[in-house]
Image: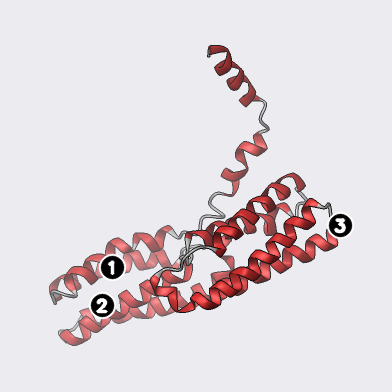
């Protein structure tokens, strides 16, 4: 047993550093999260679940400093690389959220209770919309996107064929999982379109794997990668 442990320990020393650090190097880039946005949940939660239903106008006013502080961090938040295709939608959402923050501040300076409640409701709604913009529709979609992102933006452009090959194999597994996943309730009205597009995505991913396995030329692989990417964008676009 000691010999086995010693062998494994020594073996680990010979694993290339690039393989050990590769995921760490891009971990923040493929993490579809915006910490500043989720930190604001600590602000919006008491507003929406306590002050609003209880019509606690004094509490709504007391939340102004926290609303403004948290909002400023959201305004300056930077999206991770994997969310780069969401930038335009995010910018529009942030502009709308900024407007609702201004409305909240204005309403809380007065004594119109209806206006105060309306401002709190709009603030909550616009915050939720920002969350919806960056939140993957399902875990399976997110996992597929993470692998595709590395292929599309790193492995293939840099011609890292070893990592490319492993990633394509992984992508085929993710495509199968995605094709069999269940949409959350809020997105269930898109189930039929999602199913149809997930089949297209699965088929294009399967073709990419077949081409990779048969040592196809770069032109064929390039076309197959673009097909997978286009099908993924179309699938994600169902929920924009």
Spatial separation of the CA atoms under disc 2 and disc 3: 57 Å
Do the numbered discs 2 and 3 sit on residues whose CB atoms are within 8 Å?
Answer: no
Q: Which residue is mark 2?
A: 120
Spatial separation of the CA atoms under disc 1 and disc 3: 53 Å
Note whether residue 239 is visible.
no
Q: Could you classify mark 1 by the number of other residues whose Cα lies within 10 Å: few (under 14), some (14-19), or many (20 or more)?
A: many
Q: Residue at x 56, y 75 (%)?
A: 237
Residue 56 in percent (x, y) is at 13, 74
Element on which disc 3 rests: loop
Q: Is residue 47 left or right of residue 5?
A: left
Element on which disc 1 rests: helix
Note whether residue 130 is visible.
yes
Residue 174 in percent (x, y) is at 59, 56
The answer to which quarter of the image holds residue 232 is: bottom right
Point out the tag, 1 or 3, that comes first from the N-terminus. Answer: 1
Looking at the picture, tell me which residue is in the foreground, 2 or 75.
2
Q: Is residue 164 left or right of residue 68?
A: right
Point out the tag, 2 or 3, that comes first from the N-terminus. Answer: 2
Q: Nearer the viewer, mark 2 or mark 3?
A: 3
| Residue lying at the far top of the rendered structure | 2
Residue 84 in percent (x, y) is at 58, 66
Point out the tag, 1 or 2, that comes first from the N-terminus. Answer: 1
Q: Nearer the viewer, mark 1 or mark 3?
A: 3
Element on which disc 2 rests: helix
Q: Residue at x 65, y 38 (%)?
A: 19
- Labelled disc at residue 44: 1
Q: Residue at x 52, y 59 (%)?
A: 140
Total marks in image = 3
Q: Which residue is mark 3?
A: 217
Looking at the picture, tell me which residue is in the foreground, 47 or 98.
47
The answer to which quarter of the image holds residue 103 is: bottom left
The answer to which quarter of the image holds residue 203 is: bottom right
């Amino acid at each position: 047993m000691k010999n086995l442990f010693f062998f494994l320990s020594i073996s680990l020393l010979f694993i290339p550093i690039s393989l050990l650090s590769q995921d760490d190097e891009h971990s923040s880039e493929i993490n579809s999260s915006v910490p500043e946005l989720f930190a604001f949940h600590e602000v919006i939660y008491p507003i929406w679940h306590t002050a609003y239903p209880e019509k606690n106008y004094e509490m709504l006013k007391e939340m102004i400093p926290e609303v403004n502080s948290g909002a400023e961090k959201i305004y300056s938040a930077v999206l991770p690389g994997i969310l780069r295709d969401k930038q335009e939608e995010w910018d529009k959402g942030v502009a709308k959220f900024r407007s609702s923050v201004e409305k909240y501040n204005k309403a809380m300076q007065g004594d119109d209770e209806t206006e105060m409640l309306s401002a709190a409701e709009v603030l909550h709604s616009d915050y939720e919309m920002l969350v919806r913009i960056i939140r993957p529709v399902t875990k399976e979609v997110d996992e597929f996107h993470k692998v595709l992102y590395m292929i599309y933006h790193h492995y293939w452009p840099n011609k890292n064929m070893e990592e490319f090959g492993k990633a394509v194999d992984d992508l085929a597994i993710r495509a199968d999982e995605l094709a069999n996943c269940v949409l959350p309730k809020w997105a269930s009205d898109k189930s039929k379109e999602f199913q149809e597009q997930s089949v297209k995505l699965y088929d294009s991913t399967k073709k990419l794997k077949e081409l990779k396995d048969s040592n196809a030329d770069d032109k064929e692989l390039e076309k197959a990668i673009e097909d997978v990417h286009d099908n993924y964008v179309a699938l994600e676009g169902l929920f924009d």
